[in-house]
Image (cartoon, rainbow, N blue to C red):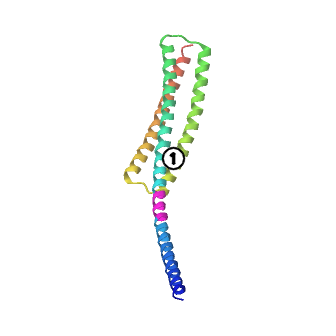
Amino acid sequence: MKRFLFIITMLASFTAGAQQTDSLKFTASEVTIDSLMVRLSSLERNYDYLYCDHELAKLTLELKDLANSISITSNSLLIRCFNARYDREQYYAYSGLYDAYVNNIGASKRKVEAVKIAVAAKVLTSNFTEQELNVIASGVDLVDSTVATIESALKQYNAVINIYSSMR
């Protein structure tokens, strides 16, 4: 009989200890979930910032490439003007290229607006630091400046085409 009471007492203490261990595991898992949620939130904010920075840098690079392409084509035609070599076929080719650049700039401006909207949405939904907001704002300013450079290069190209056409 003593042995039976001893076994029941041991089982009761073992069950109570197991319940206490389970409650400690539950508390530890709650702490782990909370810390993982904080970490996930931090990673999402970092991703949003990197996304904005990358999209603005990529767009700026694409726009600079377009501006350089327009300038190179314009300079090539200007060299033809200085050498007084008018060719009607070349004129049509350069005029067609000008029209293609105008269409490309229209598409680029639509892309700029789409990227600005995406960046604005990320800025509104993420809690960026003041420094990160300044970096993003300077990226947007750089994109705007590059668009102005493209428009200036296109005006110069148009002027050179007009000079070339007057050489007939």
Query: Residue at the location (51% across, 72% down)?
Result: 22
Viewer-proximal residue, 161 or 113?
Answer: 113
Reply yes or no: does residue 33 show up in magenta.
yes
Tell which residue pokes out farthest to the bottom in this image. Answer: 1
Vertical arrangement, residue 1 with respect to residue 148, above or below:
below
Task: Residue 149: give x, y in percent of width and height.
Answer: 46, 33
Task: Residue 160: give x, y in percent of width and height.
Answer: 51, 21
Tell me where the magenta segment starts and ends, as one range: 32-41
Screen quadrant of the N terminus: bottom right
Viewer-proximal residue, 45 or 53?
Answer: 45
The count of marks equals 1
Reply yes or no: does residue 23 show up in magenta.
no
Task: Residue 114: give x, y in percent of width and height.
Answer: 55, 45
Screen quadrant of the C terminus: top right
Vertical arrangement, residue 156 with respect to residue 144, above or below:
above
Task: Residue 142: give x, y in percent of width and height.
Answer: 43, 40
Q: Which amino acid, by three-letter code, is at mark 1?
A: Lys
Along the horizontal axis of the image, is 45 left or right of 100? left
Vertical arrangement, residue 79 with respect to residue 124, above or below:
above
Viewer-proximal residue, 110 or 129?
Answer: 129
Secondary structure that dominates the magenta span: helix
Query: Residue at the location (52% across, 87% down)?
Result: 5
Disc 1, SS: helix
Viewer-proximal residue, 163 or 66?
Answer: 66
Query: Residue at the location (53% across, 82% down)?
Result: 7
Query: Residue at the location (50% across, 79% down)?
Result: 16
Residue at label 1?
Answer: 116
Q: Residues within 10 Å of mark 1 (few under 14, many from 20)?
A: some
